[in-house]
Image: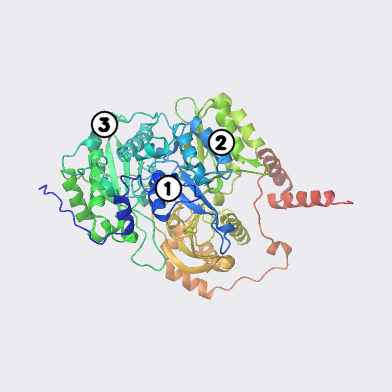
Amino acid sequence: MVNTLPTVPVQAKRSKVEFLKEKSNYLREPVLSELKLDTNHFSEDAVQILKFHGSYQQDNRDNRVKGQEKDYSMMLRTRSPGGFIPPELFLTLDRLADTYGNGTLRATTRQGFQLHGVLKRDLKATIVEIVRSMGSTLGACGDLNRNVMAPPAPYKNRPEYQYALDYANRIADLLTPQSGAYYEIWLDGEKAISAEEHPEVKAARLRNIHHSNLSSPKEPIYGEQYMPRKFKIAVTVPGDNSVDVYTQDVSLIVMTGPEGELEGFNVLVGGGLGRTHNKEETFVRAADPLGYVDKDSVYDLVKAIVATQRDYGDRTQRRHARMKYLVHDWGLEKFRQTVEKYFGRSILPYKALPEFQYKDFLGWHEQGDGKLFLGISVENGRVKDEGEFRLKTALKTLVERFSLPILLTPHQNVLFYGIQPGDRAEIDRILQASGIQPVEAIDPMVRYAMACPALPTCGLAIAESERAIPGVLARIRALLDRLGLGQEHFVVRMTGCPNGCARPYMAELGFVGITPDTYQVWLGSSPHQTRLAQAFVEKLPIAELETFLEPLLVFFKEKRSTDGKPESFGDFCHRVGFDALRSYAQTYVPAPVKASADRHRLRYRVNLRPKVFEDLKQAAEVQGRTLADIASDAIEAYLKQSQPGA
């Protein structure tokens, strides 16, 4: 190929945020000045720069009163490549949640932890403690490379998984801001002790053979304006879609040789899920195969992709600024040719891969070196204590007692690893005593669901999400039971706005908030999240959920494919098409309602201690009754007995 240098366009009408970044003195101002002010919130300009430091300013919308000042607080998000949380960092975060936060932690869909409810006056002290405990929040938000994802599987006998985690860390280091503002503001210039970056990473960052770097010595890759918008990268292994590989700006797939040695990476580009309601020029997009790169050139190719988006991404309209729009507008071939100019050579052809499958790694597993790992389901990522359910206390106890490191999963769960087999029984006992169900007892509908925080803290939320999804899932499960589909489950995801943080556009059934208590409904992705869903209903009042969903589920029951493995709901919707779904729904006549109280009984979720659950299951088998019937009878008898005068 002829390597002519790219001509970078001049974008005259840049957005306001571009000017804020340019005059921020490499992410220092106005955060540094406003941090010294005796106020309870930052200005809008400072908020934009604060994001680069890993914090969003929020207010509790439940507490809003017209004419009164908002109830401001900060959300802090960790930068944890591959989801790695060392024991000392978890204990610090657990303590900070109680000292400065709202008493909970939240595992994110990009393998970090979030602290909510931190007041402005406590922000610096909170970040100091995080950094001194081997953590960081730098680059967890803002217009730069975000947390790099990797499969949360600590297999020691499968080298491809180790390579994925290793290179997630290396790519994260390569694209970390270099200006020093973070340490000047939050640690008064003190550079924290952290893991030494790989020598290859430092050399690659400084290497500027084909103008992938800029002239700025402070930020050689980003310059003073950083990226046009957020930039997301994941590293995974062939066949493992735990990271939602098609939703990333860049995905690297580890390719190994016959002896398990690292040879290179397949590369996907141009994925992204953020969009805006009623703005057709914004859309979701699945990533495309760009090609293959050998291991020695992977840093240069990543820099070339970043440079292409940095120099050509739209800096005038932030809605159009993600790299997916550049790939879409140019076409993949022009995008590849431009990347190759920064890369200095042709990109090799993409290599054949097995089909990707969703994996969540919950439950007990052998990790290949005689030790075990344990994946614990965390509903919607919320680590909390509530009544007899004491997840936060249990996790703290396990870390303190066994000094276990954590990998956060891309689906908001927690995974402990390096567990001695002799400790398994004690760990199970601690979890059981804390009201935490084993994975086998969790409804798969709940296990595979995700929701964003939304109200009351997210400023972008239009509708409920985290607080609404438990009830929505219970209603769907009750409907499935009533229709004779009690063994079915599918991937349900919900967000309170169209930005897609919980990746609803990769769900078999996705709910996207459009007005209060009303959701856009997306259908047709696969159980393994390898295909985008499509918008099926523009506005569904959530009160009409059963009326909407019943005909679709009946159609599914009648016409699903049974060749080989039974067809999933998402695959069924995709195969028959939306016209067939709508046609069936329009002519659907519900079956007559039987005169039975059970016909109208809603199903609710109750967390049971594992021992109680096992006893209940055994009793159900002996008596030939359902778990719900036995549990309901027992609870009803207890309540009658406990009433005054009983």
Label number found at residue 89: none
Q: Secondary structure at mark 2?
A: helix
Q: CA distance from mark 2 to mark 1?
A: 27 Å
- The amino acid on which the numbered mark 1 sits, given as a three-letter code, is Glu
For marks 3 and 2 on the same chain, the one whose residue lies earlier in the sequence: 2
Instruction: Say what amino acid the circle numbered 3 marks.
Output: Glu
What is the distance, in whole Å, between disc 3 and disc 1 at their CAs?
A: 38 Å
Eye-nearest disc, 3 or 1: 1
How packed mark 3 is, by other alpha carbons closer than 10 Å (few <14, some 14-19, many 20 or more), is: few
Q: Which residue is mark 2?
A: 95
Foreground of the two, 284 or 570: 284
Spatial CA distance of label 3 from label 2 is 36 Å
Expressed as whole percent of the image width and height from the top left, the position of residue 424 reads 58, 29
Dot placed on the residue nearer the N-terminal end, 3 or 1 = 1
- Left or right of 480 in this view: 284: left
Residue type marked 2: Arg
Query: Which residue is denoted by mark 3 in the rendering?
Result: 200
Other-residue count near label 2 (Cα within 10 Å), few / some / many at <14 / 14–19 / ≥20:
some
Q: What residue lies at 51% left-to-right and 44% top-to-bottom?
A: 121
Percent x, y of residue 105: 54, 43
- Visible residue check, residue 58: yes
Label 1 CA crowd tier, 10 Å (few <14, some 14–19, many 20+): some
Q: Is residue 543 above or below residue 444?
A: below
**In this view of the protein, can residue 294 be seen by the observer?**
no
Question: Which residue matches tag 1?
Answer: 34
Q: Nearer the viewer, residue 492 or 591?
A: 492
Q: Are marks 3 and 1 in contact (CB under 8 Å)?
A: no
Q: N-terminal of the two: label 2 or label 1?
A: 1
Q: Is 74 located above or below residue 394 in the figure?
A: below
> Which-is-in-front pick, marks 3 and 2?
2
